[in-house]
Amino acid sequence: MNEIEEQKFYSLKIKEMNQNKTLKYFILTMGCQLNENDSEKLCGILEQMGYQKTDIQSQADLVVLNTCCVRENAEDKLFGKLGELKRQKEERGIMIAIGGCMMQEKHITAKIKESYPFVDILFGTHTLYKFPENLYRALKEKKKLEDIIDIEGKIYEGLPIKRNSNIKASVTIMNGCNNFCSYCIVPYVRGRERSRKPKDIIEEVKELAKQGYQEITLLGQNVNSYLRVEQEKAIEFEPYQGVHSFATLLKAINKIEGIKRIRFLSPHPKDFTNDVIEAIATCEKVCKLVHLPLQSGNSKVLKEMNRKYTKKQYLELVEKMRQTIPNLTLSTDIIVGFPGETEEEFEDTLDVVRKVKFEQVYMFLYSRRVGTPADKMENQILEEQKHIRFNKLKDLVESQIEENNQKYVGTMQKVLVEGESKNNKDLLTGRTDSNKVVIFEGNQDLIGQVIELKIVSEHMWYLKGEK
Ligand code: SAH
Ligand code: SF4
Ligand code: F3S
């Protein structure tokens, strides 16, 4: 029996144990799309055990929190939630399990054990696959369980999965990160970079295509270094359909019949080799919106962040991509208030934003993370100062988005229709290649199709379309 079959055995034992009851689970996903993809696997596991999903926490018999620790506010959120859950534990005797990135931080698990001893299961990013065994033991032996390991973590294939959508699917292509940007906790909690086998990825996407999925998002912390570590360390992997790098992976997935759109998150500017640019340009299914995390526009700050590119190199890369990829649009991540960032250095960030004119900018206040080099830097920026800079950047970004949105009005756009609009059930919602939300009137049978819409008006966070 392999590890996954062994876990299935525990799942079925739990199902048997709970036979006469229809138990419900509630899951809260607190992190990024990788975290979301892990939650989809947890949902798959839980349904295999016979649990049913509920969106109402107070009705759940089992509450699973899938945590994130990339910024400090995530911690406040978790501890707030635990206060709430304590009452439900006392009133109804629910089971509580906490997993995800934050559980890989020793000071956090220590705090939970001390201040929130009612939590039943703590599991880490490398032990998700063992959830059935852990839950079984917690239920059967009625004891608290902690299953967190601090190693590279194997990649387990064949876990059950219950996806959030039947139109768009995420496919994790690699785990971990080797970059150690000086502000970032991810390499410490997700372990070293390791890629899934080409064959496993391609077979997963083929299966998704068979099930009718239209859009695939390839996920990883540094997707454009896919299989790099394996190549460098001469770790054997079986090439499959010519796939031996990120560019060749894009090309192979582009050929899979039924899939209409391919996206990927996140690439690193330092790994944007020519073959990747060429693959984006030539693969018709690969969306021309590229997320290109900038973090800072100043070369000195970038060096301290350990990002391995300068302002000039970033701008040159953008230029090269614009020349090679027709209709390219860009989105980015920016951190404001990194230790030691001066007003002048921050101006460089604004300068890059002005020049590149991103389609979307995800802005973050620098947040100190225990164990990272930037946390030990002495020249931390005052919160007040960070907020002033953040608002300056936000104003610039919003004015650019408004200007950019106006360019859409009057154009025809290909839109993948995703479903009913959340705010108005009479309208449908979908997304352009550049990931802009488009709201329009249309028939339900359009859901899941890529259609042409004329953009008739723009609003800050969405466009209005007409058939
Ligand atoms: N691997 C991806 C995403 C990492 S986390 C990448 O490199 O782009 C997503 C974003 O969170 C990062 O791009 C960064 O902008 C932000 N981030 C990470 N650590 C942070 C910190 N300590 N404080 C503030 N923002 C942070
Ligand atoms: Fe963090 Fe940098 Fe790795 Fe992204 S590339 S996960 S920012 S260390
Ligand atoms: Fe994602 Fe947060 Fe972990 S951003 S990788 S869930 S620390």
Image (cartoon, grey):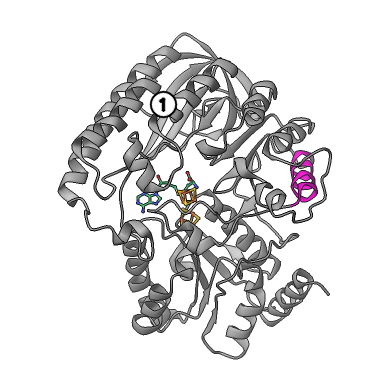
Could you tell me which quadrant the C terminus lies in? Answer: top right
Secondary structure at numbered mark 1: loop
- In this view of the protein, which residue sits in the foreground, 430 or 191? 191
Q: Say if 363 sits above or below 183 in the image.
A: above
- In this view of the protein, which residue sits in the foreground, 415 or 250? 250
Could you tell me which quadrant the N terminus lies in? Answer: bottom right
In magenta, the rendered stretch is 197-209
Q: Amino acid at mark 1?
A: Phe
Q: Is residue 30 visible?
A: yes
Classify residue 106 by image quadrant: bottom left
- Residue placed at 25% from the left, 39% from the top? 390
- Residue placed at 72% from the left, 73% from the top? 7
Image location (x, y in percent) of residue 314: 44, 30
Task: Judge from the rendering whether residue 294 lies leftward or rightward of residue 261; answer left or right.
Answer: left
Q: Circle 1 is placed at which residue position?
A: 358
Q: Say if 221 sits above or below 128 in the image.
A: above
Residue 208 part of the magenta-drawn span:
yes
- Residue placed at 82% from the left, 45% from the top? 239
Main secondary structure found in the magenta portion: helix
